[in-house]
Image: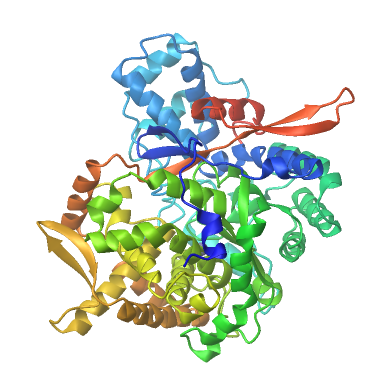
Amino acid sequence: MLLTGFTTAQAQTPDSFNYCDEKFADIQMLRYKVDGFEDLSLKEKTFIYYLQEAALAGRDILFDQNGRYNLRIRQMLEAVYTEYQGDKKSADYKAFDTYLRRVWFSSGIHHHYGSEKFEPGFSEGWLRSALASINYTEPECIKGQDGKASWEELMPVIFDANVMTMRVNQKDGEDLILTSASNYYAPGITQKEVEEFYANRKANNDPTPIMTGMNSRLQRDEFGRLTERVWRVGGMYSGALERIVKNLEKALPYACTEKQVVVLKRLIEYYRTGDLRTFDNYTIHWLQDTESRVDFVNGFTESYGDPLGMKASWESIVNFKDIEATKRTERMSANAQWFEDNAPIDARFKKPECKGVTAKVITAAILGGDLYPSTAIGINLPNSDWVRREYGSKSVTIGNLTHAYAMASQGSGMSEEFVVDKATREILSIYGPALDDLHTDLHECLGHGSGRLLPGTDTEALKAYSSVIEETRADLFGLYYVADAKMLELELVPNAEAYQAQYYTYMMNGLMTQLVRIKEGGTIEEAHMRNRALIARWVLEQATKDAKGGKPAVELAKVKGKTYVRVNDYKALRNYFGKLLAEIQRIKSEGDFEAARKLVETYAINIDAKLHKEILKRYAKLSASPYKGFINPVYKAVRDANGNITDVTLDYTEGYAEQMLRYSKEYNTLPLVNE
Ligand code: ZN
């Protein structure tokens, strides 16, 4: 029996749309289809048009946030790309071409996921001669950020492996600020200085604390004192923010509801003032607006790029509700209190009253900033703990993106190579994509929103481990409930066994296949990858221990010399997920930094070299790419003689490089140096 809510969002029938585009390095570019756009009203289409302009206008901000030289490097590389007349078949040129594609993809010179600096693959000598051949000079205004002549100082940034090695360094025991290349703190500022600066500025005992430091760069004034440069109109990143505000204002008359007009006005006010209390007010209006068909995220949002998890990178997504598929998540959110009451965690950590849990399935219309080209498939906002506690949160699953992923993964060979046997492969192929979506829904819609801190617990007690612990918590919540009888009752799964697909995939990914994203000798750096490793390895260790030499619930088994995950007891697996959830919730609720540190350092970072080597070797034979991202569609406004928009059309034919070059030209909103 397949249920409507179960099938609509993820009907896996192949269609003629070209989901896969070009490949380079470890990247596969995909396209997403904006199904249903044509059926929207002209008002809604026009609204989307201006919002997508606002989404694209912030692109330069992320480049600068990811590294202080990124905008200069991008401009320099693009000049070579468009003007170079030399041999384009040479190995150097080809490596250069790949490098630029990677820089575009990552919005900077570090890997978008692992955060390590790219190895150029072409020589410094080649780049120098290419620059000479096109007579490249930087604009006069740039006298060199570090006192050297012009682009000379970019050379070590690109070629010296010891300069700006990691965008986000999270190595325990090192100065995370000094050793991270992300541009949230001026060079030379230490972690200790940052922590003291913000400890002094945080209002103690404020029950509604603003997210201090979220929207600024910390730097020194002329006396060497630390000071915040706020990202606002008239402040840092003003050029981009002015352009965003201008388009938000143009969008205003087309807002779906009166509520949404207020949302937009608050956001504009916040961008103008940089005031974080206004930002909180904006997010409250935003999360309470559940009726508007068209919705958006536009702002400084997630803090994965700051080693201390405080400063937020700029991102945007514009979307509209997939009404049919949303029925699925509505059944879930309507029962939020039931899930909270029945969670396998200590009663002290449960929310007595789940407020404002809303969830919907959306169709992405445009991706921008930190959601482009690599993107999330689910989002739960806002991030402020007190706003979530008092007002709830809005959570989305992005249906047309998960659909594109599912379509693209067909025929990658991953399942044939890494899944232990035919029976398991069958379960995965029947239930895999839908259960993935369900897990995402649970993670976003209920997981992040569940539980509460004990009174007096500092919201930032877990420091550098907070992102990993929070993602672990949301994932475990999803894993625990995906196997619950309630899923059948709510008609979210077709039968009582479908959850096995999610359990198997999760363990396989956490123990083995996600490692294809990491180079030999590396460690796990990214928060979501760490959380998956933490869960899978902790469960494997417990299961091995409990088996006392017998058959464990889950094991790494060797078949014909190859390693596979084998699950012997799915029900027992669920108990382990529940047990770990209880502990993770305790850690978060009590702010137990030491326990968080120990779990993450023990299970989430280091890699078994032998297993890693084997996985990489098996993976290399497949035609799959470990990372994927999306090329945006192009929106065009059709106007009458008076300039009024009479229609908005969509085009899917723009190429990747073409799109990136156009964005650099049309959405060139910031100076090359912003400090
Ligand atoms: Zn999450």
Compared to 648, does 235 lie above or below? below
Residue drawn at x 75%, y 49% as measured from the top left: 271
Residue at the outermost right position: 642
- Residue at 33 percent of width and 63 percent of height: 427
Q: Is 17 on the left-hand or right-hand side of 315?
A: left
Say which residue appears at 47% left-offset and 19% top-offset.
81
Say if residue 150 shows up in the picture. no
Q: Is residue 133 visible?
A: yes
Quadrant for residue 444, please give it.
bottom right
Question: Is residue 49 rendered to the left or right of residue 597?
Answer: right
Total labels: the figure holds: 0
Could you say which quadrant of the image residue 674 lies in? top right
**Residue at x-position 66% and y-position 27%:** 666
456 up-or-down from 185: above or below:
below
Query: x and y percent of residue 651 in the render?
Result: 62, 30
Q: Please say if 46 is above or below 507.
A: above
Left or right: 21, with 576 as reference point: right
Q: From this viewpoint, which residue is outermost toward the front?
A: 1
For the residue pair 392 and 650, the one nearer the viewer reads as 650
